[in-house]
Image (cartoon, rainbow, N blue to C red):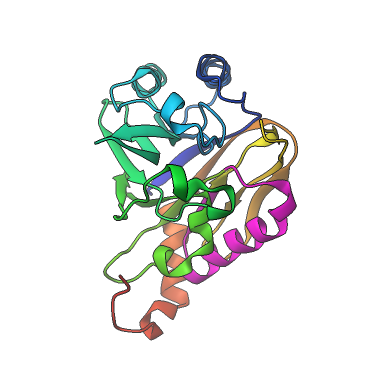
Amino acid sequence: MQKLTITLIQTELFWENKEVNIHHFTKLIEDIKEQTDVIILPEMFSTGFSMNASALAEKMDGPVVSWMKETAKKKQAVICGSLIIEEDEKYFNRFVWVGTDGIVQSYNKRHLFRMANENDFYTNGTKKIIIEYKGFKIFPAVCYDLRFPVWLRRTKQFDYDMMIVVANWPERRALHWKALLHARAIENQCYVVAVNRVGNDGNGFLYSGESSLINPKGEIVFQQANDSFTKTFTIELAEVNEWRNNFKAIEDADSFVFE
């Protein structure tokens, strides 16, 4: 039976302070007692959701990605989350997945949050990815992507078992966050694992977390607001396959492929 153990870390972030954030996450990860396969951190976990890209960005061989590689090897678990990356004189809000073997896979946030002028400072991504790990097909997304179901649509040509959403989603839109996570799980018949932050950022915005685990039937397995926590869960591929076999909604989807 194929299983995957995942750990969600919901926490405050220290505004634009990489050193303190990395020290903070090092301690939280060291304190995980259970054996886990994947540790998920929030969006822009090393800085907070900052538009100060030119000052905070690093290359893919920079200190934060190097820390992710060292931590993944030491903990023998995947480390993933998003951070600010500079590449070809452009800045990206990049989801980075680092395996225990040091192999890195990445996805650039497609939908940039114009209400915070993210699109003025960052370049949007153009490609989706599927990460295959321990029998699961995993689709990463970043925050505002969640509002765009066509981009996230599971099809026969783009199939996955679990969606990971990392975010800095403010408390004032928590109703939308919870509803959209719920909808994405139901319509795609997949696990949705979402990690948001808590606390206030440097712009005075409050974040309530509401990090979640939702199963392929759309049932909320876990969702918690406001408190910092580290939680570990085990999910089963059989639960995905059983529900999809019993409720074959994808057979009635449009036959064309969304671009």
Q: Is residue 182 left or right of residue 121?
A: right
Q: Is residue 71 left or right of residue 128?
A: right
Question: Which SS does the magenta portion mostly show?
Answer: helix
Instruction: Determine if the magenta segment contains residue 222.
Output: no
Instruction: Residue 133: name its quadrant.
Output: top left
**Rendered residue at 40%/22% (across/down):** 64
Q: Is 50 rendered above or below residue 176?
A: above
Q: Position of residue 167 (x, y in %)?
A: 55, 44
Instruction: Residue 76: name its quadrant.
Output: top left
**Rendered residue at 33%/20% (across/down):** 62
The answer to whether any part of residue 238 appears in the image is yes
Q: Is residue 200 left or right of residue 144?
A: right
Q: Position of residue 227 (x, y in %)?
A: 74, 34
Instruction: Determine if the magenta segment contains residue 171.
Output: yes
**Rendered residue at 32%/73% (across/down):** 258
Residue closer to the observer: 9 or 141? 141
Q: Position of residue 47 (x, y in %)?
A: 53, 27
Segment tinted magenta in the rendering = 168-193
Q: Is 140 rendered above or below residue 204?
A: below
Instruction: Residue 224: name its quadrant.
Output: top right
Residue closer to the observer: 26 or 171? 171
**Rendered residue at 50%/26% (across/down):** 46
The answer to whether any part of residue 248 appears in the image is no
Q: Is 217 rendered above or below residue 230?
A: below
Q: Report the quarter where the C terminus lies.
A: bottom left
Q: Is 33 rendered above or below residue 215?
A: above
